Amino acid sequence: MASAEQPSGTAPEAVPEVPAFLAEAVTRINEAIRLGNITSAAAMAEQSGASAVQAFGEGHPHVLHLRELSAYVAYLAGDPTRSLAISLDTARAWHHRGDPRAYQSVLQAAAAWRAVTDAREGLRLGEELLALWAELASVAGPAAADITQLEAARRRMGRLAERAAGQARGSSEPSAPREP
């Protein structure tokens, strides 16, 4: 995972050494992804995440890294809504820890959000994404330093609102009779 810049005056938190059982699980998940066995990768990510939560607790960096991997697997599986939800939860957890890696999770959520094709669903999910993103951008750190991404997401929300309004108008109008 790429590391984000640290806010000025904040030292990066050292991540404890990854235990062998988690390192092995991540290796197996990545191998399944490489082989295109996404269903297997998803099952392994889910199981490994549950084991990591039991061993370390919900907000531990090992758990959060596994959640990032689970979000990626969900994206590969064609479930951008699930990927987005996992990424947002992970971003909130990083943010709660005061960790600038929250921004990387927000960017992962944004990638999943762009894959949501239903305009109304995109609007609903986008509101949640933009609220967290704006919160991250309001403090010193990588999100504040890269405001252009947030502005682009806001523009997408405008386009989604227009599409959703068009869909609503289209569904309320009676359909034209079919020609034989």
Image (cartoon, rainbow, N blue to C red):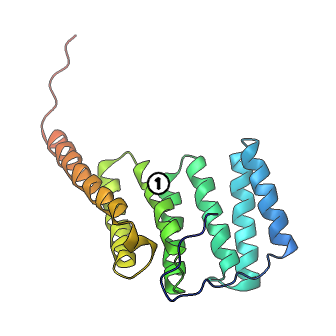
Query: Which quadrant of the structure image shows residue 117?
Result: top left
Q: Is residue 28 left or right of residue 87?
A: right
The structure residue drawn at horizontal position 40% and vertical position 81%, both measured from the top left corner, is 140
Q: Nearer the viewer, residue 170 or 164?
A: 164
Q: Nearer the viewer, residue 71 or 176?
A: 71
Identify the image quadrant of the C terminus: top left
> Residue pushed farthest right?
20
Name the residue furthest top: 180
Furthest-bottom residue in view?
9
Q: Quadrant of the N terminus?
A: bottom right
In this rendering, is residue 74 above or below 14?
A: above
Say how many tags the image has: 1
Q: In the depicted view, which residue is nearer to us: 16 or 87?
A: 16
Question: Which residue position is annotated with label 1?
Answer: 111
Q: Position of residue 3 (x, y in %)?
A: 60, 69
> Where residue 58 sits: x, y (%)?
63, 82
**Which residue is nearer to you in this view: 176 or 112?**
112
Badge 1 element: helix
Q: Seen in the image, is 171 located left or right of residue 131?
A: left
With respect to residue 142, does 41 lie above or below? Answer: above
How far from the left and from the top, in percent, is residue 136?
40, 77
Q: The residue under label 1 is which amino acid type?
A: Ala
Judge the density around disc 1: few (<14), some (14-19), many (≥20) Cα neighbours within 10 Å: some
Q: Residue at x 59, y 87 (%)?
A: 11
Residue at 17% from the left image edge and 39% from the top image edge: 170
Position of 115 with respect to 177 (left or right) is right
The spot of residue 65 in percent (x, y) is 66, 70
